[in-house]
Image (cartoon, rainbow, N blue to C red):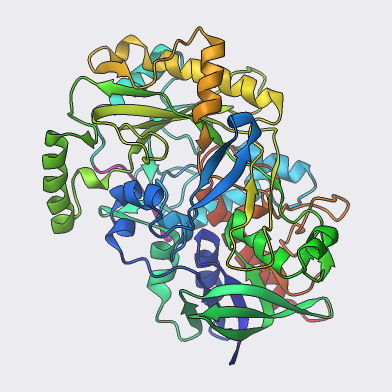
Amino acid sequence: MSEKFDYVIVGAGSAGCVLAARLSEDKNVSVCLIEAGGNDNSAFVQMPAGVAASVPYGINSWHYQTVPQANLNNRCGFVPRGKVLGGSSSINAMVYIRGNRWDFDNWAAQGNHGWDYYSLLPYFIKAETNHSINNEFHGSNGPLQVNELQTPSPVNQYFLKGCAEQGIALNSDINGVNQEGARLSQVTQHNGERCSAAKAYLTPNLSRPNLTVMTKVQVEKLIVTDNTVTALRVNHKNRRRIINASKEVIVSAGAINSPQLLMLSGIGDKDALKKLGIEPTLHLPGVGQNLQDHLTVVPLYRAKTSAGTFGISLPGAMQMTTQTYQWFKNRTGDLTSNFAESHAFFSIDNDAPAPEIQMEFVIGLVDDHSRKLHWGHGYSVHASLMRPKSRGSVTLKDNNPKSAPLIDPNYLDHPDDLTTLLAGLKQTLSVLESSAFNEIKGEMIYPLDKNNDEQLIEFIRSTADTEYHPVGTCKMGSKDDELSVVDSELKVHGLANLRVVDASIMPTIITGNTNASVIAIAEKAADLIKLERSQPADQ
């Protein structure tokens, strides 16, 4: 069975949903969006607090893990990635943070023309409707709804005051002039529901006759003829089909699955592919390399009261029953929480070009991605290293499309990463031990002494893990860069009719949560594709 479209997009995550919506605005082109997961109408997706089940238990997720990490006591880390319409934007904590302007200027300084901050800012603005901040940095007419938390916990005020005690001032707009500081989270929610990329971009446009969305379809391979990608082989319910693309195939499967698909298609390091029985199509050794992620360490504290926090207790169970009814009835109440209700950015080195540490304050005892449960109530903080110097990889286990890839973030390989994260953990503990928390602070789940470096380092090695932001595995850069995979128009070097558009193209990781930036990347990519289509064929 064979089908044909102008544009075929692989992956209905944050980038794929944007591309499908923007490209199908032109009624004269046909667009096909392919997603390995199912639809997004589950309460686990639409209810903001559903993230507590989606992430730890693999609901709507690929549920990967890393290879053993030598610098984390040989533990295997956790790598949940969205497998549903909306991708990871349907299972994430909905925090709206764009990154630091220096991040994008640094991309441009690496030779990626058109990717500096002021070139990307119009796409952040275009994507966004911000319901509480109205200034030149924010949008008011975009599909992505950005709001303040509907019912923030009063416990956040202890954190914000603790930050102030430690010299981290309040910042009304961390996506504006200056990123450093502390704030209640802005979230991609609206009317008590998650506003994923699917909800923002895809759902309103599903009735377009030129847009076809396929779910529960696994793309197995790109078909390349004369250095041109012409089609894909897909598997649906164990039946293979060929889907042809007359103009372009756009791979938007994310930082793990995009390089996996390229390598399965023979695009990657030729020697590594041959060893797996894959005939090389194009020698591109950067595919799957340059993996970067935010490593986070999480101190946890019990609270003296159950008020304002989530937890396992009789009062907590009664609260959950009441709040579940309230959310289903009118989309209000505590289950509109994203758990990571406030955050702060700060630097260790005063000369750093952008904040080096992000703290996310969580109103619950979230231990090991909520896979390790504790009786009672409390709070925790994710202290995350923003710009690691370590680099890892995504490689193939074998030539079977159903096999999970080998994911190696190579955490703490560079010694500076441990030094900076240790300093960030110390500062985080100073905030949590400040007098602002005296009214609520109980015992630590894992007692730590902020003056004992040896103990803190062991805590990092025995507990630190992902903050869910893998990037960089199809790096944007010039042909002279042996690790680059795509050029500044996101076209794959050496092949026609193929682009990669997602977090994998980031040359270096950004300072903060990655979802907003991926949406802006896709908005820009859609314009690049439209501009090329509008130009005469001989140009």
Q: Position of residue 156 (x, y in %)?
A: 30, 28
Magenta-highlighted residues: 143-150
Magenta stretch, main secondary structure, is strand
Give the image quarter of residue 72.
top right
Left or right: residue 459 compared with residue 395: left
Q: Position of residue 321 (x, y in %)?
A: 13, 47
Left or right: residue 153 compared with residue 203: left
Q: Is residue 241 above or below residue 262?
A: below
Taking depth in this image into account, of 13 and 70 the one nearest to the observer is: 70
Q: Position of residue 50 (x, y in %)?
A: 30, 51
Q: Is residue 443 above or below residue 373?
A: above
Q: Residue at x 58, y 33 (%)?
A: 386
Q: Is residue 325 magenta?
A: no
Taking depth in this image into account, of 135 and 299 the one nearest to the observer is: 299
* Residue positioned most to the bottom: 1
Total count of labels: 0
Q: Residue at x 40, y 45 (%)?
A: 93
Q: Position of residue 450 (x, y in %)?
A: 47, 11
Rendered-image quadrant of the N terminus: bottom right
Rendered-image quadrant of the C terminus: bottom right
Q: Residue at x 88, y 52 (%)?
A: 480
Q: Is residue 146 magenta?
A: yes
Taking depth in this image into account, of 131 and 387 the one nearest to the observer is: 387
Q: Is residue 502 visible?
A: no
Q: Is residue 503 visible?
A: yes
Q: Residue at x 44, y 55 (%)?
A: 89
Q: Is residue 2 above or below residue 452?
A: below
* Residue positioned most to the right: 480
Q: Is residue 293 above or below residue 220?
A: above
